[in-house]
Amino acid sequence: MKTQADRLGKIPEYPFARWGERVNATRARGIDVIRLDIGNPDLPPPDVVIDALCSSARQSSHHGYPGYRGIPALREEITSYYTRRFGVNLDPKDEVVPLLGSKEGIVHLALGVLDAGDLVLVPDPGYPSYTTGAVLAGAEVYKFPLGQERGFLPDFNAIPVEVADAAQMMWLNYPNNPTSATADLGLFEQAVAFARHHDLLLCHDAPYCDVVYDGHTPPSLLQIPGAKEVAVEFNSLSKTYNMAGWRAGMAVGNPDVLASLSRVKSNVDSGQFRPVQEAAARALAIPGEWIEVRNRTYKERMRTAISGLASLGFPVTPPSATFYIWTRVPEGWNSEGFATALLEKAGVAVAPGSFFGEQGEGYIRISLTSPEPRIAEAVDRIRKVIKGISSVWSG
Ligand SMILES: Cc1ncc(COP(=O)(O)O)c(C=O)c1O
């Protein structure tokens, strides 16, 4: 009996699934693990969003199939958010697609747009699903490096012309997971020009655009004039409104590309539970102060983590967005070995940088999705074990 498609052999098991099992096994040994490894917000969504979900779920007519393109109220709220936040105008009819979380859309977009043998440009390090979607669609992947020396921004000129000409799609993600780098409009202008020049679809993934510090306001790629002709952007309620488990996101931009995405989705997922859509619409209408207060919480955690890690010799720069710290492992260690040592000896789970690609080797990613006292305790625990496990630590 055949139990696995050949194409599945080309995608590794989701690295965080394997890592999660290791964390659970450590917990099963009685160790109190502080989880700073996954980007899973620990704070609750706004009360009004939970109220909207509950009251909608009490309507007897809200439990059937919800339709395919998302309810108009949600599409309009996404449109209003884009106008208010970025000054970008979208047509709610065909330039907005609600998603069951942006990960779903990222993978389904590939199935809607790519053919076997197509080529996709993917950042390394990067969020694994860009590659997963391409591989499931039978496409090839060319990884372009995001190096520390360039602030983890792409060097468009370093991508060979024949590769760029052959490619059908390119992924960018700012504010960036895992490096926490941010991009400005200048970078997005270059990206749109590159996409036009090489006749490829530019996909920008922006789930961290509202997890920001010190007044930083990351732009949307769609702010670049004409971007909609060559680009789509993904966004999510997971990080902005602490709704990761709800599975609510969006794709916006080029209507032809979104039509392909919708065609895949309508054949696969039959839409999103109506109460989740109504609650998501409510979330998007929430005044910015709620987000500011939430960001202040991350900022306090960031201060504790950065000062603690710096005192241990980790090279860290305070990021202006995301809740991630991306830092080098001590000399003589690889990412997974160091993360495993922290897990087993300190009971602190961090993400090995190598989970995000070859260029992530030598780094770990620390996610500030635990309360501040737990982060302070994690730093203390690391302090106690670091000398023992890192005889060649040079900072
Ligand atoms: C860069 C990036 N894109 C997309 C996602 C997926 O988010 P969701 O599917 O919860 O909307 C994540 C989640 O961690 C992410 O970090």
Image: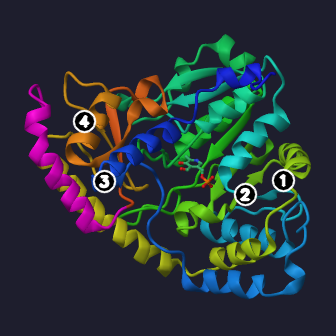
For the residues labelled 2 and 4, the Cα–Cα distance comes to 36 Å
* Residue 143 spot, x, y in % from top left: 56, 22
Q: Which badge, 4 or 1, is on the more N-terminal residue?
A: 1
For the residues labelled 3 and 2, the Cα–Cα distance comes to 30 Å
In the picture, measured across the screen, residue 91 lies left or right of residue 176, that is: right
Q: Which of marks 2 and 4 is in front?
A: 4
To which residue does mark 3 refer?
33
Residue beneath the point at 67% across and 52% down: 102
Residue 100 numbered mark, or none: 2
Q: Is residue 230 visible to the viewer in this orientation of the structure? A: no
Q: Which of marks 3 and 2 is in front?
A: 3
Residue beneath the point at 32% across and 65% down: 299
Residue beneath the point at 57% across and 55% down: 207
Q: Does the magenta stretch include residue 264?
A: no
Circle 1 sits in a helix, a strand or a loop, which is it? loop
For the residues labelled 4 and 1, the Cα–Cα distance comes to 41 Å
How would you classify the magenta stretch by its main secondary structure? helix
Q: Give the range drawn in magenta.
A: 370-395
